């Protein structure tokens, strides 16, 4: 496989928030390069800016300075800011984000509603993540682990260029984790999905990641 | 130790109140079993279809329009930043202060051949004086517009609160799945807040079906005007009651839908957190479009009628006429007495329900009166009072035509409003406080006086303001039940408008709006507090 060295290229990103005339710096001239198809894990202390980095990459936060390039296209710089919905980046977070009025299948098909074979795609991903029995269930009928797998399926089924995971498996029990890690790894590899994951769990890093970075004082260090 | 005497005082009070509240409604419903007169068959064969068709068309048209206006404006002020947003956040509620009948009177004159709108356009375009730019407003379409622009705030308020309570991460998830703001609005936000929209629209449907003043002025044959004509034209009270029963059944359905939807909103909110979603800044065309979408309903529903009423008022030589002053004092007199009684009854009922662990069903039953149109309630009370008069004839006492009937109608009609406020205020007082007071030997009456009432002060004031604002603009029940020569502001406006003396009706109309603005101010504060 021809792997681009700078599939995701985050250059000199500076992100800060104003709080009562006080500038709180979250990310300071941060740089990050991720190869196509790679699975990179980021660790770091609470409040170090890991989540903010992921939100800036997918467009939910607007950095003050810097440039973000994805698959040779500028998705953010001083002049350009591609809206979140047009970046084709998936994000799975720890919080429950399933749409409460839709069942599992409808949730998964939300992002691929225009696709002709959406039913096959959703059935396929549900099978791979072992959630096919949940297809008619609503979010309030699902356990924490089941909800997370549905959220993951919903993001993966869109075949995003980049998948961002923000501690998505922290609520899952160890037994379940060991079952689904290989499945996730296989799906991501099969679809050549590049992945950036924030985690505190070193077992998770071992099972899934190709590379581990540590975010400290607004900068990324390779471990 | 169980004390049957003390228990019975509180329970007797509730039983007495429930009996008085339910008798007029039961009288109306009971009319169905008294046989149908020739008048009923005449109405059934010739007019009932027209009444039904117009009422359904009105409810359908108004429901669609209030949904579009209320939900769109709520979405804009919640999720976007645009010019005038801070003003529109609270100004969009202002039309609540304008009763539909008042807007109907204003619009009839405003768009009339010689009205302000046509004169303005003629002078602007320097055209001939016989050109008419606006179609006749006195049609069902005009009525739909009138109701929609005065009642949309019901949908706006519930939609706004529901939208503010949506978890921001759900909206972010939708965007991450490739949906833009408009697609997110239609496929995510509207389905999630659907129970809130249904609750708001059901309230609007109830208000529309209950209205008498606007449809009467527009001469649209609906159920309420039909009931009024059957009673005052055919002098057939029983047939009027039978028609009322049909309407009440329909309105109770909306009442049940509204209540059911409200329970669903509570369930939804329990799983969501407060919205901290960053509003999107709209630029250029989008900014202007959002500004206009919010301006149009506020302008038509509030500023236009207020400006026109001011315009008419200053053209009247003596706006502070003795008649207007008497109408204002009558309005305040009867509204204040009724409101104090409503707050007292609601307080005692809620205290009893809480203290004796009774079911909230009693409050639901007492709130049924809200769903009964004022006109129909007046018919039921009149029938009840005439029956009582026949019993009191030996004592040479008559209560029909006294102020008692009017106050009773007001109490039954607005108990639900007062109860909504006090009931939720009561939930914020922990039951452990009552238990602590009991262990300190506090009697029930003392618990109410020294602990509950001081803690419920804000709730009581809010209930008082909300109820009095509703009563000041009440028309149909007042029109029928007021004592002879006892005009309120609403009745004055109605009578003057029906004689086409709009300029003289303007000042009492303005006073109704001013009184109506007081609770809106508090409602706004409440919504802003909810928003943090």
Image (cartoon, rainbow, N blue to C red):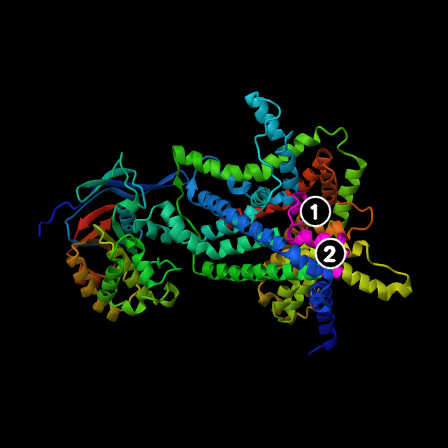
Position of A105 relative to A90 (above/below)? below
Residue at mark 2: chain: B
Numbered disc in front, either 2 or 1: 2
Identify the residue position indicated by label 2 in the image. Answer: B378
Task: Quadrant for residue B30, please give it.
Answer: bottom right
Q: Residue at x 57, y 20 (%)?
A: B126
Task: Quadrant for residue B359, please give it.
Answer: bottom right
Residue B204's spot in the image, x, y percent?
Answer: 57, 51
Position of B182 relative to B423 (above/below)? above
Residue closest to the eye, B513 or B269? B513
State the extent of the magenta-drawn residues as a range: B210-239
Task: Please tell me whether the stretch drawn in magenta is mainly helix, strand or loop.
Answer: helix
Q: Is residue B454 visible?
A: no
Identify the residue position indicated by label 1 in the image. Answer: B472
Instruction: Looking at the image, tell me whether mark 2 or mark 1 is earlier in sequence order.
Output: 2
Q: Mark 2 vs mark 1: same chain?
A: yes
The reply to whether dot 2 and dot 1 touch (C-beta < 8 Å) is: no
């Amino acid at each position: 496989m021809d792997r681009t060295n700078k599939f995701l290229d985050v250059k000199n990103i500076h992100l800060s928030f104003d709080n009562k005339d006080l500038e709180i710096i979250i990310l300071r001239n941060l740089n990050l390069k991720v190869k196509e198809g790679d699975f990179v894990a980021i660790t770091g202390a609470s409040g170090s800016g890991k989540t903010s980095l992921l939100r800036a990459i997918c467009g939910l936060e607007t950095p003050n300075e810097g440039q973000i390039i994805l698959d040779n296209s500028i998705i953010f710089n001083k002049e350009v800011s591609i809206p979140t919905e047009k970046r084709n980046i998936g994000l799975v977070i720890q919080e429950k984000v399933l749409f409460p009025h839709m069942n599992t299948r409808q949730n998964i098909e939300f992002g691929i509603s225009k696709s002709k074979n959406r039913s096959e795609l959703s059935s396929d991903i549900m099978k791979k993540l072992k959630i096919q029995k949940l297809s008619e269930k609503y979010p309030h009928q699902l356990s924490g682990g089941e909800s997370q797998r549905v959220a993951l399926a919903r993001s993966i089924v869109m075949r995003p260029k980049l998948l961002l995971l923000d501690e998505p498996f922290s609520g899952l029990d160890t037994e379940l984790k060991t079952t689904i890690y290989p499945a996730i790894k296989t799906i991501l590899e099969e679809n050549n999905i590049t992945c950036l994951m924030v985690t505190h769990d070193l077992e998770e890093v071992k099972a899934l990641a190709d590379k581990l970075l540590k975010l400290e004082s607004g900068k990324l260090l390779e471990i | 130790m169980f004390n049957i005497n003390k228990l019975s005082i509180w329970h007797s009070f509730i039983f007495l109140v429930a009996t008085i509240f339910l008798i007029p409604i039961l009288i109306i419903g009971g009319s169905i079993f008294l046989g149908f007169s020739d008048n009923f068959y005449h109405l059934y064969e010739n007019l009932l279809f027209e009444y039904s068709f117009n009422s359904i068309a009105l409810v359908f048209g108004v429901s669609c329009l209030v949904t579009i206006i209320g939900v769109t404006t709520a979405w804009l002020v919640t999720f976007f930043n645009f010019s005038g947003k801070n003003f529109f956040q609270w100004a969009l509620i202002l039309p609540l202060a304008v009763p539909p009948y008042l807007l109907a009177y204003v619009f009839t004159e405003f768009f009339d051949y010689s009205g302000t709108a046509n004169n303005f356009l003629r002078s602007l375009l320097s055209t001939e004086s016989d050109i008419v730019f606006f179609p006749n407003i006195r049609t069902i379409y005009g009525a739909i517009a009138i109701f929609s622009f005065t009642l949309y705030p019901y949908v706006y308020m519930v939609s706004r609160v529901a939208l503010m309570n949506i978890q921001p991460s759900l909206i972010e998830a939708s965007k991450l799945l490739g949906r833009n703001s408009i697609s997110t609005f239609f496929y995510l936000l509207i389905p999630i807040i659907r129970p809130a929209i249904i609750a708001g629209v059901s309230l609007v449907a109830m208000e529309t079906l209950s209205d008498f003043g606007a449809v009467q002025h527009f001469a649209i044959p609906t159920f309420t005007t039909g009931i009024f004509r059957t009673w005052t034209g055919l002098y057939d009270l029983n047939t009027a009651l039978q028609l009322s029963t049909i309407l009440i059944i329909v309105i109770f359905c909306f009442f049940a839908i509204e209540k059911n939807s409200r329970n669903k909103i509570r369930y939804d909110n329990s799983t969501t957190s407060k919205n901290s979603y960053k509003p999107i800044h709209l630029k250029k065309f989008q900014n202007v479009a959002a500004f206009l979408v919010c301006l149009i309903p506020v302008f038509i529903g509030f500023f236009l009628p207020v400006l026109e009423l001011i315009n008419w008022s200053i053209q009247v030589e003596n706006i502070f006429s003795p008649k207007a002053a008497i109408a204002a004092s009558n309005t305040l007199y009867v509204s204040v007495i009724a409101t104090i009684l409503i707050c007292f009854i609601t307080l005692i009922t809620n205290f009893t329900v809480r203290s004796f662990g009774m079911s909230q069903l009693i409050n639901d039953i007492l709130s049924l009166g809200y769903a009964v149109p004022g006109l129909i309630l007046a018919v039921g009370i009149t029938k009840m009072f005439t029956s009582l008069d026949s019993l009191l004839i030996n004592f040479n006492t008559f209560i029909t035509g006294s102020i008692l009937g009017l106050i009773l109608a007001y109490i039954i009609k607005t108990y639900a409003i007062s109860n909504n406020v006090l009931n939720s205020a009561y939930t914020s007082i922990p039951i452990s406080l009552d238990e602590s007071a009991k262990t300190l030997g506090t009697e029930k009456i003392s618990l109410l006086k020294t602990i509950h009432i001081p803690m419920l002060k804000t709730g009581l004031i809010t209930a008082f303001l909300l109820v009095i604002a509703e009563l000041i603009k009440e028309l149909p029940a007042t029109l029928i039940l007021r004592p002879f020569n006892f005009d309120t502001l609403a009745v004055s406006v109605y009578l003057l408008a029906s004689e086409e003396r709009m300029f003289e009706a303007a000042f009492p109309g303005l006073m109704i709006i001013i009184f109506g603005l007081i609770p809106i101010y508090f409602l706004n504060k409440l919504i802003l507090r909810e928003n943090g």
